[in-house]
Image (tube, rainbow, N blue to C red):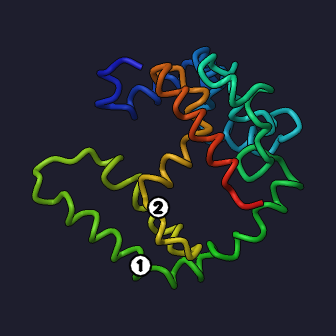
Amino acid sequence: MDPAHLLNPDEAFRALAEDNPVQFIPALQMFFVLTEDLCREVLRDTRTFTSQFANKPGEVPEEVKSRLPEGYPQSCPGLINNDPPAHTEHRRPIARLFTPKTVLKYQPIMEKFTTELIDGFVDDGRVEFVSRFAVPLPIKVITAILGADDLDIDTVVRWSIAPFSLVDPNLEYAVRVQMATDWQCQLEVAPV
């Protein structure tokens, strides 16, 4: 995307949605659907638009082939890479933690974290909003709700993006190799 579009993404996306609401992004090997109606259609038609192949990494870099001789581990079906009815089975155990009534119960925690994060940058005059607020806030809230609020936020962020990073052509090759290695180490120590 043109850097000028980043300053006014609404206008850029509106123009894309009007001209061609389904965009294939070759670098990501993904389609982007840009209108609400088409998004709903895609989300409802899981037979045509399956999530089972989401996040499929490419070839294993030479530097980590000794650790991954058979390629990347098959990712476990979960919330992101699964379709109903299996998706529903994965979602059910955590869904009760995120009902409107339950979320309302966590409002004081959300307000506390919001205030802490804003206090961390309010005097700076400028802020990179995504890294300083938009990313840490939901992670802090969700880990608190799940009872895992003692986890380091940066570690949770790395764990969260590691599988996606494997397919990100914009990352330096060395970074992708490191992410692949970190992801494999994470799988080796994760409880079953």
The answer to whether 122 appears left or right of 182 in the picture is left
Tag count: 2
Residue picked out by circle 1: 109
* SS at mark 2 in the image: helix
Residue nearest the observer in this picture, 129 or 179? 179
On-image quarter of the N terminus: top left
Identify which residue is drawn at 68% across, 34% down. Answer: 55
Residue picked out by circle 2: 138
Give the class, few, some or many, for how many residues have Cα within 10 Å of label 2's Cα (few <14, many ≥20). some
Residue nearest the observer in this picture, 172 or 17? 172
Picture coordinates of residue 77, whole percent (x, y): 80, 48
Q: Amino acid at mark 1?
A: Ile
Picture coordinates of residue 89, whole percent (x, y): 84, 62
Residue 150: mark = none
Picture coordinates of residue 91, whole percent (x, y): 75, 62
Q: Earlier in the sequence, mark 1 or mark 2?
A: 1
Q: Amino acid at mark 2?
A: Pro
Picture coordinates of residue 176, whole percent (x, y): 53, 27
Q: Quadrant of residue 33?
A: top right
On-image quarter of the C terminus: bottom right
In the rendered view, would you say 127 is above or below 14?
below
Q: How far is mark 1 from mark 2, CA to CA? A: 11 Å
Q: Quadrant of residue 152?
A: bottom left
Identify which residue is drawn at 30% across, 48% down. Answer: 129
Identify which residue is drawn at 56% across, 48% down. Answer: 160
The answer to whether 131 appears left or right of 150 in the picture is left
